[in-house]
Image (tube, rainbow, N blue to C red):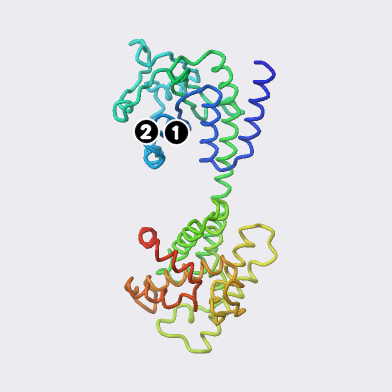
Amino acid sequence: MDEKVFQKILDIGIALSSEHDLDTLLNKILSKAQEITGADGGSVYLVKKDRLIFKASRNCTLLKKLGAKKMNELVKTFELPASKKSMAGYAAVTGRTLNIPNVKNIPADEEYFYDPSFDKKYDYDTVSMLVIPMRNKQDEVTGVLQLINSLENGKPVPFKESQEKIISSFSSQAAIAIENAALNDLLEQAHFDTIFRLSEAAEYRDKETANHIKRVSHYAKLLFEKMGHNKEECKLLFWSAPMHDIGKLGIPDAILQKPGPLTSEERAIMEQHAAIGALVLKDSAIPVIAKSRIVALTHHEKYDGSGYPQKLKGEAIPLEGRVVALADVYDALSSKRVYKPPMPEEKAIAILKEGAGRHFDPLLVKIFLGEMKKIKEIR
């Protein structure tokens, strides 16, 4: 391997190691592998015990033919046995690389074979294939990188031995990056699980609202997405929104579970939960906790300044608070509670419209009502 190629592999490895989102990483791996080999398409499988998990796929020809939307529909995760019968399974089980000049000429006595059903269904012609096991630091096969049709002048040709060597080196770096990203996913999930359980504790005394915090998180994330916020910002709000009512831990059960209207004194106590939540979450350097504090403190502020606890007005209310306020009220209206049945959708929507500019940010109401199909799916 010459110095330029080695430097390119090193640069790619550094780029992969900096990506912690698993789905994004897998697409980067395929993109870089295609760039190195001129492959028209490729797939990544992850190995879990005796199963292969199809996780990502790219194909330039089919993308042009079918369009991005249809391609996204095709690329759905599925599992299959890690068996020697499939080429990906063979590479996973044996740890051997397969460099096949033409899949139609695989000898009948080989343990693996090529299934042409995908080609027939989508009018594609698979010819050459390079299938490489991906090994982690412990030299265990944790995935399989499968590349299709190395192209020269637009025509499929066999993958060169030099390409095989480069991709073998590349796949080891990719395997380590995948393992790190998977660990990051587990850590993030552990964080969210902890947040959710803490949030659920505030609602647990009323079982009818057990899923309230989940729905509010999904509604809030949807609003943020439609406003153009990036994936990380949407994820952060999704994790922060469950903590909006964490301050209810400091409110007596008699008030939380009262089956009728609250008195003015009880209402004043109930309204303390926003400030209590902010106190519980104060002084944290962890982004999700800091964001959760903003949500807990401001999700009962109103656009016209008549909310609590600070009587903030308009855009002085943090966007996260305005978003969760809308999501929270809609879910409260449309859900069963100890003190009321669920409100008919038409009435709930009418209340949101009436509250635009008074209770709620009017732009957020417009976006929310424009996404009612997705809102219903979440609910």
Q: Residue at x 51, y 31 (%)?
A: 30
Q: Earlier in the sequence, mark 1 or mark 2?
A: 1
Q: Is residue 319 above or below residue 71?
A: below
Q: Which mark is residue 99?
A: none
Q: Residue at x 33, y 28 (%)?
A: 118
Q: Which residue extends farthest bottom?
A: 264
Can you identify the residue that label 1 sits on? 57
Q: Is residue 265 above or below residue 371?
A: below
Residue 41 percent coordinates (x, y) = 45, 27
Using residue 3 as the reference point, say whether residue 220 is left or right of it: left
Q: Give the SS element for disc 2.
A: helix
Q: Give the SS element for disc 1.
A: strand
Residue 259 percent coordinates (x, y) = 40, 81
How many angstroms separate mark 1 from mark 2 (CA)? 15 Å
Rendered image quadrant of residue 350: bottom left
Can you identify the residue that label 2 sits on? 65
Q: Residue at x 61, y 75 (%)?
A: 275
Query: Mark 1: few, some, or many residues within 10 Å (few <14, many ≥20)?
Result: many
Amino acid residing under circle 1: Ser
Query: Mark 2: few, some, or many residues within 10 Å (few <14, many ≥20)?
Result: few
Residue 132 percent coordinates (x, y) = 50, 22
Seen from the viewer's position, the closer of residues 20 and 326 is 326
Q: Which residue extends farthest front?
A: 153
